[in-house]
Amino acid sequence: MEKNKNATLDMAELQQDRVEIAAGGTVSALERWLAQKLAELGGASAVDLVLWNGDEIKQREGKPVARVIIRDRGALFKLLVDPGLHFGDLYSVGRVEIEGDLVQFLEVAYRAVTDMSRRPLLKRVQALTQQRPRRNTLHGSRSNIHHHYDIGNDFYQLWLDREMQYTCAYFPDPAMTLEQAQLAKLEHVCRKLRLTRGERVVEAGCGWGGLARYMARQYGVRVRSYNISHEQIVYARAKAKAEGLDKLVEYVEDDYRNINGSYDAFVSVGMLEHVGPENYRELGEVVHRSLNPRGRGLIHSIGRNSPGLMNAWIEKRIFPGACPPSLMQMMDIFEPRGFSVLDVENLREHYVLTLRHWLARYESHAEHIERTFDETFVRAWRLYLAGSIAAFTTSSLQLFQVAFARPNVRDLPWNRAYLYR
Amino acid sequence: MEKNKNATLDMAELQQDRVEIAAGGTVSALERWLAQKLAELGGASAVDLVLWNGDEIKQREGKPVARVIIRDRGALFKLLVDPGLHFGDLYSVGRVEIEGDLVQFLEVAYRAVTDMSRRPLLKRVQALTQQRPRRNTLHGSRSNIHHHYDIGNDFYQLWLDREMQYTCAYFPDPAMTLEQAQLAKLEHVCRKLRLTRGERVVEAGCGWGGLARYMARQYGVRVRSYNISHEQIVYARAKAKAEGLDKLVEYVEDDYRNINGSYDAFVSVGMLEHVGPENYRELGEVVHRSLNPRGRGLIHSIGRNSPGLMNAWIEKRIFPGACPPSLMQMMDIFEPRGFSVLDVENLREHYVLTLRHWLARYESHAEHIERTFDETFVRAWRLYLAGSIAAFTTSSLQLFQVAFARPNVRDLPWNRAYLYR
């Protein structure tokens, strides 16, 4: 695995944080009081705090879910100012340490944030202080996507499935392996699209191209897939050629806004999170001009129960420009042009399983990854994966598959049993 | 069947229209030109116009889908001013007649309206001139619901199924009878709710109470069902008693806004159309305060691909206050309180079949209904049922079933095959 300049560059600012660590020293009465306040943010949470001088702040008796070790007073102050933003960096460089189960601790944190944001005043204050995600203009999108997806195929290959699917798998049976569940996802999507041999499909955001190849191989359709990640496109093309599918599948290194041609089906799995709600109408226009009169489609995306922003740290360090929409927001794609929404399925719990598989594989390669990148990188990605599990288990995030069609498509199946045969 | 004062009263204004008929007379050049313009509204539609002097306006060669006979110049002018509003009354009193298939003619009309409303200018003009539906205040709702549902149980019994379900049936197999499909609908709803014995269910808008009795009988749950239609409540109570279900099912003659108590499930089939989007947040609050922490629910409603109003005539004569929402509008129920939407199913084509069954049964009793009410009533209801078929076949209307749950309900089924066993 090659040392990746892009990834380490992104971590440069973060690395400086390391220098600030001033471990040890006394804890003043004020600092202790502030730490107490911080602990109380978690409500009646089963989390203990340990300060840099060893002082312990227990919220209640008994064994805690986790102990949060704060290694210096700067870290304490940062956590008080904006825990959602700063915890990630502080954890990544080791100025904050978690003893105990990281996922369980993050679940406590997510629940605390959810409870807080239910208080109307806090909601308004948050709205004022929260950073908006970086805008996904044509140029901005390229930069945002490059940030995340061009870390290196080698890195993702370590912990994704063989088809390199970096989106929620589908576990009709939770005992399935990740490989099985990712194949089941591809099949589930194809069935919802009701593909037939010889049809033309356009895909917006194709990752490493697994869905396009599956559709071509299993359903005999011709696919044109758009993606602005150079590394992914190179990989996808090579794989399609190796599998003899390059006559049916065309990978286009371009933005979804530049899609042209007329198709029977539109599909997008895991791109909408990067589009931004302000661009949904435009995406709807792209779908509208791309689909022929019998056209139908499917959009698969991380979502939310109600509008809100991605965790600030994830948006800053991991996914610039990301914003998972609520269904109400998603409807801005479909309603202006009068598409009929036919089926919405919430696969939230499937993402919990997917992420647990990813995290376990990731951990099994942690040493190797640390040699290629560094410890900060390993910790940041561990936090991102563990935090994503917590986001789904606490219902902060959902996973929506929305199937739709032109309003006058009338040969709809009479029931959905065909998805389960 | 008793002559129903309420129903005939509503038709009084309409009956006066009959007097205005001034059949015969010459057709001026201006009138012919206007009729030509009216015919053109349908685009390249296969509909011919016949004027009161026998003059025929053909849009194209060959056999038309239908011939529209306009019996007097007043009718022509009214159709030009607002066809959506006036066609219904003019047809009901026989000032306009349709020769040919009424449903097919109405499909042509619906498509013409849809095409027109796609033109941005016309859309804005329509928005200005369209009447808003009557408001569903606590008092307004009672009056609106009384208008439609208290015509008399005898009338509805003539053409609904044995359980008197005046909502979309579910035809997993389109060859099913109406009775079978209405039972299949009840079962489908119960499965989506994942009811277990002994649970408590609250129902908002129960019609003649069929779903409540089914849930109690088949799933052993306790149900409290709210409805503001007096005639329906009386019928529902008598039937529950006769079936020995009155220990499990309680029918409450009250508005959904007055629901109290704590429940495992909330269900509402065919009420949302009468609620009005301005009240969806309040409905969401009702759901929120009614559901316990493991609560889930289902809302079944006529809907639309994008926000818009019910056909003006249907809103005026048949369903005062009715407004079928788009999914974006429906999300106002769920998102403010952060419910997780789990499953949305569009059953549009099932309503086409349901309505075809209803219309056939209705026609088989037309003579009897005319003796009880009068010819105008028979024609008005025929138009309403035929027009509803056309609204669904042309995708002007949809049927959404939205299943949801408290955000932290985590024991979700891993797939939806359980709905199809």
Image (cartoon, coloured by chain):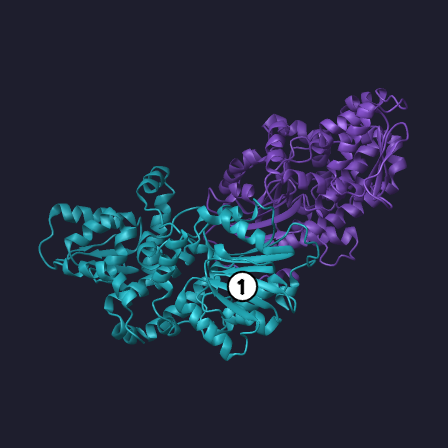
Chain colours: A cyan, B purple
Q: Quadrant of the C terminus of chain B?
A: bottom right
The answer to whether residue B375 is seen in the rendering is: yes
- Quadrant (top left/top right/bottom left/bottom right) for the N terminus of chain B: top right
Specify whether residue A399 is in view.
Answer: no
Q: Nearer the viewer, residue A36 or B200?
A: A36
Q: Nearer the viewer, residue B399 or B86?
A: B86
Compared to residue B79, the image places residue B420 above or below, namely below
- In the current view of this chain or complex, which residue is farthest to the front? B29
Q: Residues within 10 Å of mark 1 (few under 14, many from 20)?
A: some
Task: Write down the residue under mark 1.
Answer: B414
Amino acid at circle 1: Trp
Secondary element at tag 1: loop
Instruction: Provide residue B148's location: percent of width, then percent of height.
Output: 72, 32
Looking at the image, residue A403 lies above or below residue B49: below
Q: Position of residue A312 (x, y in %)?
A: 32, 52
Image point 83% across, 34% down: which residue?
A: B379
The residue lying at 62 percent from left, 29 percent from top is B132
Q: Is residue B219 left or right of residue B153?
A: left
Q: Above or below — where is B38 with respect to A86?
A: above
Q: Position of residue A138 (x, y in %)?
A: 41, 53
Left or right: residue B6 compared with residue A147: right
Across and down, in percent, residue B245 comes to: 69, 46
Task: Kindly indicate the quadrant of the structure image that contains residue B304.
Answer: top right
Q: Chain of mark 1?
A: B
- Tally of numbered tags: 1
Q: Which quadrant of the figure has residue A356?
A: bottom left
